[in-house]
């Protein structure tokens, strides 16, 4: 995950002392500010919440322009950001601020805040060898490593709160690859992560750990399965296994570990992707957390007399009967154009209601419920941005609208997944829009206008 930069020269003892003094002063100032002021963006929602879908991570938080372009143009709706840790390459974060965090959360992004601090004592990566590492001393059951983990967690909570990342959110520790066969190195790393989790829980946050499948992931899963209770396990696990599969599976992780809905899988390493004219070098992830992308079952409408969900919506007119007629009656009743019974019989009253609806919505005159009427009736309501991973009644309206417009045959589930994405792209192509698979205002405007 970590993007490397050129290692600096080894600092002198005097320079280290000056830096430490300045850092302590800075921390004291920050602590005083946190006492005097409310947390930044205190109303922000917990992140990542419940979500199943695509995410990306990049060392430096992207600009707002880039985030906006990727919001409407990419399949991604989760983003990893480095918020703390002295060992991260991107300690300078020119774009990351409370406003940036609040804006992304308001736009529906799921944030994955990452810390990269002390690494395993036996790491072989040159840059980490020049930095503070996890103390491998076994004294008092690796007490020094536990203290380091707790301190790193407390520091991360301070950074998260300053950015407006609310309690209840998951904070992730990035433990890069190391040799797990060295006992003190392995056990001190496990103890460090246990301390990390203990402290996060004490301060009201959820614990996450990111690591390579063959090292950090494996030792955590082995300890969970073979030494239960020996360590406090993280709540969520982020597995780096570049097997190219957008799922949560890894050959290094038992199927019952961190399941269900407690995994992130980084399945592809650094590469460029471009959306909305903006290119970012990213790692790609599949995210499945909380309850996943789920939505409550939809009840039947009009006191149980009607369902709105069909794979296709053929024209209904006078003389027709059946469930589709009941749906039309119920929809027209909900919008105030029909007052008769929902009995599945298309009579003169239904024809009159259809005429009134067409006139009010500037659709061509007529007494039938055809493609344009179906699309408009089924789509109208709130118009939020929707993409892969969304789960709501608005997704149901899109799925129904696409079925009416294109005979897409989508199951009306309320969950935005691959088939819905493909149907949105087909609709966009048919109307001269960029084929992003994202339901933007341009897509909504056509659907609610009854454009098949």
Image (cartoon, rainbow, N blue to C red):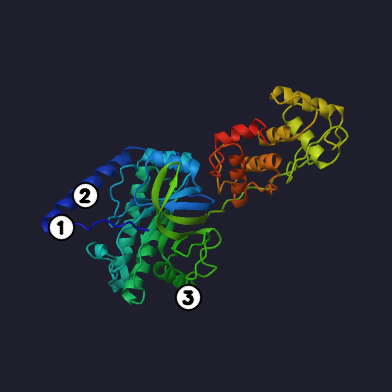
Residue position for label 3: 226
Q: Position of residue 15 (x, y in %)?
A: 13, 54
Which residue is depicted at the point 64% across and 41% down? 398
Residue position for label 2: 24
Which label was assigned to residue 374? Answer: none
Q: CA distance from mark 2 to mark 3?
A: 41 Å
The earlier-in-sequence mark between 1 and 2 is: 1
Residue 305 appears left or right of 121: right
Q: Is residue 141 above or below residue 430?
A: below
Q: Going by the picture, which residue comes out furthest to the left?
A: 14
Which residue is depicted at the point 50% across and 67% down? 250
> Which quarter of the image is occupied by the C terminus?
top right
Asked whether disc 1 touches disc 2, contact meaning CB atoms under 8 Å apart, the reply is: no
Q: Position of residue 381 (x, y in %)?
A: 64, 33
Which residue is depicted at the point 35% across and 41% down? 97
The earlier-in-sequence mark between 2 and 3 is: 2
Q: Position of residue 314 (x, y in %)?
A: 77, 40
Which residue is depicted at the point 56% across and 34% down? 442
The residue nearer to you, when weighing 132 against 350, is 350
Secondary element under disc 3, as helix, strand or loop, is helix
The residue nearer to you, when weighing 166 against 291, is 291
Asked whether disc 3 touches disc 1, contact meaning CB atoms under 8 Å apart, the reply is: no
The residue nearer to you, when weighing 279 against 1, is 279
Q: Which image quadrant is residue 369 in?
A: top right
Residue position for label 1: 11
Secondary element under disc 1, as helix, strand or loop, is loop
Say which of marks 1 and 2 sits in front: 1
Q: Is residue 324 above or below residue 192?
A: above
The residue nearer to you, when weighing 112 against 422, is 422
């Amino acid at each position: 995950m970590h993007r490397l930069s050129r290692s600096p020269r080894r600092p002198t003892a005097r320079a280290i002392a000056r830096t430490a003094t300045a850092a302590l002063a800075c921390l004291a100032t920050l602590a005083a500010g946190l006492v005097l002021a409310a947390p930044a963006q205190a109303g922000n929602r917990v992140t990542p919440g419940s979500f199943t879908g695509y995410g990306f991570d990049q060392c430096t938080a992207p600009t707002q322009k880039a985030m906006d372009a990727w919001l409407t143009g990419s399949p991604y709706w989760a983003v990893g950001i480095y918020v703390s840790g002295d060992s991260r390459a991107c300690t300078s974060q020119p774009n990351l601020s409370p406003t940036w965090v609040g804006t992304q959360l308001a736009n529906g992004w799921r944030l994955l805040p990452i810390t990269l601090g002390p690494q395993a004592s036996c790491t072989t990566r040159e840059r980490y060898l020049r930095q503070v590492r996890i103390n491998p001393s076994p004294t008092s059951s690796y007490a020094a490593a536990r203290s380091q983990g707790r301190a790193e967690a407390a520091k991360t909570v301070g950074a998260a709160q300053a950015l407006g990342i609310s309690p209840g959110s998951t904070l992730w520790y990035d433990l890069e690859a190391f040799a797990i066969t060295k006992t003190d190195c392995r056990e001190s790393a496990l103890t460090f992560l246990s301390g990390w989790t203990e402290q996060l829980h004490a301060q009201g946050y959820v614990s996450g750990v990111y690591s390579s499948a063959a090292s950090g992931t494996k030792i955590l899963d082995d300890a969970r399965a073979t030494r239960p209770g020996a360590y406090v396990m993280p709540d969520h696990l982020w597995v780096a296994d570049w097997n190219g599969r957008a799922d949560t599976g890894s050959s290094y992780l038992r199927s019952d570990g961190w399941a269900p809905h407690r995994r992130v899988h980084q399945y592809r390493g650094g590469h460029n992707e471009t959306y909305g004219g903006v290119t970012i070098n990213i790692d790609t992830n599949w995210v499945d957390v909380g309850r996943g992308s789920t939505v409550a079952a939809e009840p039947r409408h009009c006191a149980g007399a009607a369902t709105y969900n069909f794979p296709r919506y053929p024209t209904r007119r006078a003389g027709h009967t059946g469930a589709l007629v009941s749906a039309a009656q119920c929809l027209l009743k909900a919008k105030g154009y029909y007052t008769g019974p929902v009995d599945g019989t298309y009579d003169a009253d239904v024809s009159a209601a259809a005429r009134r609806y067409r006139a009010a919505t500037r659709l061509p005159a007529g007494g039938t419920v055809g493609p344009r009427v179906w699309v408009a009736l089924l789509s109208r309501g709130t118009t939020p941005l929707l993409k892969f991973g969304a789960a709501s009644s608005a997704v149901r309206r899109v799925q129904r609208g696409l079925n009416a417009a294109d005979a897409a045959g989508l199951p009306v589930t309320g969950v935005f997944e691959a088939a819905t994405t493909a149907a949105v792209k087909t609709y966009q192509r048919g109307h001269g829009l960029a084929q992003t698979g994202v339901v933007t205002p341009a897509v909504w405007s056509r659907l609610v206008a009854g454009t098949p």
